[in-house]
Image: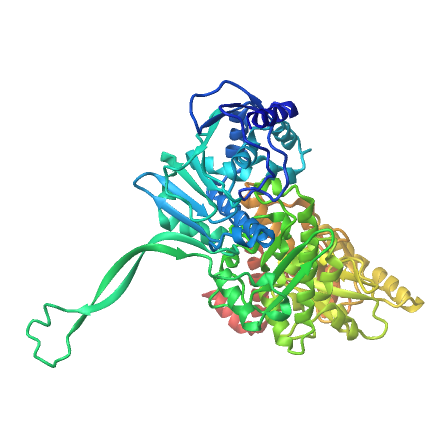
C-alpha cells in the first residue's frame, strides 16, 4: 500500500511542477468529477513531494504560479460586477447536480443516492457567512486537488498574458477554476465541505484564504452532508456585508438563476397572517356563542424555492400555448400591462447551437420613450445553460432593434467569463445575424397581415427604429426599405410604402419624388410640390429630420431613382425641341429680372433661374445638387449652437431662386424694373417675393424686422391707393 502511494506521487511529480504538496501523498489518481466547473475531462494537477506535516488527515498545498497576480486579474479585470459571484457558484452547483443525475444512470442501483437534487442558500449575518449547498456529485480528495487547484497552473499566467493581447481562446478560461474563485470577490476565506458520490468516500474540507496555499482535510467535525454534495462556506469581507441580507441574495437569484433546472431554495423570513381566538374579546363569551377571532402576523424562517418559473424557450414551439408565451413575456420583462404584438420561437443548429424566443412589444417600452437608445434598457437576455449571463451585450443585437425583447440560450458560449471577454467570441456574431433575420421576418409577418391596422400600430411605435436600421445597417438595408412608411401628397391621413407609390405612378414617370418639411402641412405648401402634382405625380413627405437622413441613404428602389424634388435641376420636361425653345425664349425675355435679382440677392442665393414647372407660386427656393434641406439646416444650426458654435452654416444656406414667368407678381416686377429699377419700391417688392419664397419653401426669413417693414410698406402703399384724394388731403392737413 505504501509503495502504491509513493508511486502515485512520483508519477504526479514527474508530469510537471505546478504547485507543491506538504503532507501525506494522495491515495490514487481517479478520474475528474468536477464540482460544477465546465464539464471537461482534465488530468490531475502536477504535484511534487515536500516536507511532511505532523497531522494525520491534513495536507497543505502551496501555489507556485503567481496566485496573487492571477487573483488580481480575476477580481479586477474579469469581473467588474461583484454580484456575479452568486451566479457563478449557483451554476457550478447546478452542473454538479446535473453530473450526478447523469452518472446515476450508469451507477449500480444499490449505490444510487436517492437525495433529490437541489441547491440551498443561507445567509448567516451573525457569523458573517454565506452558505451554498448542493446535493450534487461531490468531490474526492484527488478531485479537490485537481478542480480547485486549477488556478495554480503555471499555464494560467500565459493565458492571462494572451488574454490581454487578444490571442487567447476564451473558451479555455473555464479550465482554470475562475468560476469558483469568483467567491473571493466577496469573501476573504472559503471553505468547501464535500462528499463524493463514489462509494465509501469520506467527507472532506478544502480551505483557503486566497493566499499562497490551501489545505485539504477530513471534515468529520461539521454537520454531515445528506448523501453526496458540496457545501461552500464564504467568510464575507467587511466591505461586502450587503450579501448577508436575504433580500439581496433573492434579488441576485431572480436576476441570474431563475431558470436553473434544479430547485434553488433560499433561507428567508416570511410573514403570514393567521386568525386566532381573541382572548380579550372572548372574556365574557356566553356558552354556545361563536368565539371572536383576530388576525396576527406570524414570522417564519424557512427555505423558500426561488426558481419556480420554467424556461419555455427550451420546449418545442408546438408544445407551447399562446397564453404561455404571453404570460412568460409579462413575467420575464415586467410588462404586466403590455400584450406582445408578435413573437418567434426557434432553435439554430449547426455551427452554433442556441435557442431563442423574441418578442415585439405591443407598445413602446417606457424606458425607450425618453431615449430611443437608452443604455439602461434591457431587451435581450443572454443565458448559457439556463444561467443568466448578461443583458448589456451590444453585439448580440444592433441598436436599431433595441425595442425587440427576448431570451437567447446557448451551450456554445463560455459560462464563467466576463461580458468584456465574451464580446470577443465569434459565436456572438453568428447569433446576431440569426436574431436580426428572425426579427425582420416578424416585421414582414405583421406588414402582410390582412388587418392593416396592426402594421400601422407597429409603425407608429417602432418605425423610427427601422429608419435607423436603413441608415446604419447596410447588410439588411435592402430588406428594410420595403417596410418603410411615409405620408404623401395623395395618402391623406394614411401611410404609403414605396411599393404602393410605384403601383400608383402614371405612365411616363421616371423617378420617385419626395420633399422635406416640418409636418405634412408645411411640406405640402412648398412650391416645388406644384411641379409634380400638376403632372399627377405623387410626392412623399419627409416630415422629420430622421426621415431626411433615411431617404438620403436610399438611392433607388426597384430600378426607380429616389429624388429630392427641392434640389436644383429637377428634370420633368419631355425631350422635345418645343420645350427647349420655350425655355430659351423665356430666359431671353426675362433677362433683366434675372440680372436684377442676382444683384439684389447677392450672398443670399447662388443664382436665379426661370422655371416652367411652377404653377401657383411666383417663386421657389431649391437647393443645389449637394445642398442641405432647410429642415436639416435648422437641425444642424441647433446642434452647432448647443456645442458652443455660432450656428453659422455659411454658404450652405445659399439656395437657387426659381421664378415663375407666368405669374402676375413676376410680370409686375419685370415692369417695375424696366420703369424704375433703382427705386426702393422695386427693391422692396423683389425682396418681399424672395421672403415669401423662402417661407413657403421651408426656409427661415433672415431678418424678421426688415420683412415686417416691407410688409408694412406694401400695406401703406395699398391703403393710400384706396383712400379718396380729398380724404388724403384732410388727413395731411391734420
**Res. 672 visible in picture:** no
Task: Judge by depth and name the residue closer to the eye, 221 or 543.
Answer: 221
Location of residue 194 in the rendering, given as x and y in whole percent from the top left corner: 46, 41
Q: Quadrant of residue 567?
A: bottom right
- Residue that appears at 61% across and 52% down: 106
Q: Quadrant of the C terminus?
A: bottom left
Task: Judge by depth and name the residue closer to the eye, 445 or 651.
Answer: 445
- Above-or-below relation of 436 to 460: above
- Residue that appears at 64% across and 38% down: 172
692 sits left or right of 125 in the view: right
Query: From this viewpoint, which residue is outermost toward the left?
Result: 284
Query: From this viewpoint, which residue is outermost toward the right?
Result: 577
Image coloring type: rainbow
- Above-or-below relation of 157 to 603: above
585 sits left or right of 615 in the view: right
Location of residue 431 in the rendering, given as x and y in whole percent from the top left corner: 67, 52
- Above-or-below relation of 717 to 169: below
Q: Quadrant of the N terminus?
A: top right
Task: Judge by depth and name the residue closer to the eye, 209 or 166.
Answer: 209
Amino acid at each position: 500500500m505504501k509503495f502504491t502511494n509513493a508511486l502515485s506521487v512520483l508519477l504526479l511529480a514527474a508530469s510537471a511542477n505546478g504547485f507543491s504538496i506538504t503532507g501525506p501523498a494522495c491515495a490514487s489518481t481517479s478520474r475528474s468529477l468536477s464540482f460544477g466547473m465546465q464539464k471537461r475531462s482534465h488530468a490531475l494537477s502536477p504535484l511534487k513531494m515536500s516536507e511532511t506535516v505532523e497531522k494525520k488527515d491534513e495536507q497543505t498545498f502551496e501555489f507556485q504560479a503567481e496566485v496573487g497576480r492571477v487573483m488580481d486579474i480575476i477580481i479586477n479585470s474579469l469581473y467588474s460586477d461583484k454580484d456575479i459571484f452568486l451566479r457563478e457558484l449557483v451554476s457550478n452547483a447546478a452542473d454538479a447536480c446535473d453530473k450526478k443525475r447523469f452518472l446515476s444512470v450508469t451507477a449500480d442501483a444499490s449505490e444510487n443516492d436517492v437525495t433529490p437534487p437541489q441547491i440551498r442558500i443561507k445567509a448567516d449575518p451573525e457569523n458573517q457567512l454565506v452558505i451554498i449547498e448542493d446535493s450534487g456529485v461531490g468531490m474526492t480528495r484527488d478531485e479537490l486537488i485537481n478542480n480547485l487547484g486549477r488556478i495554480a497552473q503555471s499555464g494560467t499566467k500565459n493565458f492571462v498574458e494572451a488574454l490581454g493581447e487578444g490571442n487567447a481562446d476564451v473558451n479555455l478560461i473555464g479550465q482554470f477554476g475562475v468560476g469558483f474563485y469568483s467567491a473571493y470577490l466577496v469573501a476573504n476565506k472559503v471553505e468547501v465541505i464535500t462528499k463524493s458520490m463514489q462509494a465509501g468516500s469520506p467527507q472532506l474540507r478544502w480551505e483557503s484564504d486566497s493566499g499562497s496555499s490551501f489545505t485539504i482535510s477530513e471534515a468529520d467535525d461539521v454537520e454531515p452532508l445528506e448523501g453526496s454534495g458540496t457545501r461552500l462556506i464564504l467568510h464575507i469581507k467587511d466591505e461586502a456585508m450587503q450579501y448577508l441580507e436575504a433580500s439581496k441574495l433573492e434579488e441576485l437569484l431572480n436576476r441570474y438563476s431563475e431558470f436553473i433546472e434544479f430547485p434553488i431554495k433560499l433561507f428567508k423570513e416570511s410573514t403570514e397572517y393567521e386568525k386566532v381566538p381573541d382572548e380579550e374579546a372572548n372574556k365574557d363569551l356566553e356558552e354556545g356563542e361563536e368565539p371572536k377571532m383576530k388576525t396576527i402576523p406570524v414570522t417564519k424562517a424557512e427555505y423558500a424555492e426561488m426558481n419556480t418559473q420554467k424556461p419555455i424557450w427550451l420546449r418545442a414551439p408546438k408544445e407551447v400555448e399562446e397564453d404561455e408565451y404571453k404570460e412568460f413575456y409579462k413575467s420575464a420583462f415586467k410588462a404586466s400591462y403590455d400584450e406582445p404584438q408578435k413573437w418567434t420561437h426557434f432553435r439554430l443548429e449547426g455551427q452554433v447551437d442556441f435557442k431563442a424566443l423574441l418578442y415585439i412589444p405591443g407598445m413602446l417600452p417606457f424606458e425607450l420613450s425618453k431615449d430611443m437608445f437608452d443604455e439602461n434598457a434591457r431587451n435581450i437576455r443572454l443565458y448559457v445553460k439556463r444561467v443568466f449571463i448578461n443583458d448589456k451585450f451590444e453585439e448580440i443585437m444592433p441598436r436599431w432593434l433595441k425595442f425587440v425583447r427576448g431570451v437567447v440560450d446557448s451551450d456554445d458560449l463560455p459560462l464563467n467569463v466576463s461580458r468584456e471577454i465574451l464580446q470577443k467570441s465569434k459565436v456572438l456574431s453568428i447569433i446576431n445575424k440569426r436574431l436580426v433575420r428572425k426579427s425582420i421576418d416578424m416585421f414582414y409577418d405583421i406588414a402582410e397581415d390582412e388587418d392593416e391596422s396592426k402594421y400601422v400600430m407597429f409603425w407608429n411605435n417602432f418605425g423610427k427604429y427601422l429608419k435607423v436600421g436603413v441608415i446604419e445597417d447596410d447588410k439588411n438595408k435592402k430588406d428594410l426599405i420595403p417596410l418603410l412608411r411615409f405620408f404623401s401628397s395623395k395618402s391623406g391621413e394614411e401611410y404609403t410604402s414605396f411599393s404602393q407609390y410605384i403601383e400608383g405612378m402614371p405612365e411616363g414617370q421616371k423617378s420617385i419624388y419626395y420633399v422635406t418639411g416640418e409636418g405634412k402641412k408645411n411640406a405640402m405648401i412648398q412650391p416645388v410640390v406644384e411641379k409634380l402634382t400638376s403632372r399627377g405625380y405623387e410626392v412623399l413627405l419627409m416630415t422629420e429630420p430622421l426621415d431626411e437622413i433615411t431617404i438620403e441613404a436610399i438611392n433607388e428602389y426597384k430600378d426607380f431613382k429616389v429624388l429630392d424634388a427641392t434640389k436644383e435641376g429637377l428634370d420633368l420636361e419631355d425631350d422635345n425641341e418645343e420645350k427647349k425653345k420655350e425655355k430659351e425664349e423665356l430666359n431671353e425675355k426675362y433677362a433683366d429680372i434675372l440680372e436684377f435679382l442676382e444683384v439684389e440677392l447677392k450672398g443670399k442665393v447662388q443664382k436665379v433661374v426661370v422655371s416652367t414647372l411652377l404653377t401657383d407660386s411666383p417663386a421657389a427656393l431649391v437647393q443645389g445638387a449637394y445642398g442641405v434641406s432647410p429642415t436639416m439646416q435648422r437641425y444642424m444650426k441647433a446642434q452647432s449652437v448647443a456645442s458652443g458654435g455660432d450656428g453659422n452654416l455659411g454658404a450652405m444656406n445659399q439656395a437657387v431662386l426659381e421664378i415663375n414667368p407666368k405669374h402676375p407678381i413676376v410680370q409686375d416686377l419685370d415692369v417695375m424694373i424696366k420703369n424704375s429699377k433703382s427705386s426702393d419700391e422695386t427693391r422692396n417688392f423683389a425682396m418681399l417675393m424672395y421672403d415669401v419664397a423662402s417661407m413657403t419653401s421651408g426656409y427661415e426669413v433672415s431678418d424678421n424686422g426688415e420683412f415686417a417693414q416691407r410688409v408694412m410698406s406694401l400695406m401703406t402703399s395699398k391703403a393710400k391707393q384706396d383712400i379718396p384724394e380729398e380724404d388724403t388731403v384732410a388727413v395731411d392737413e391734420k
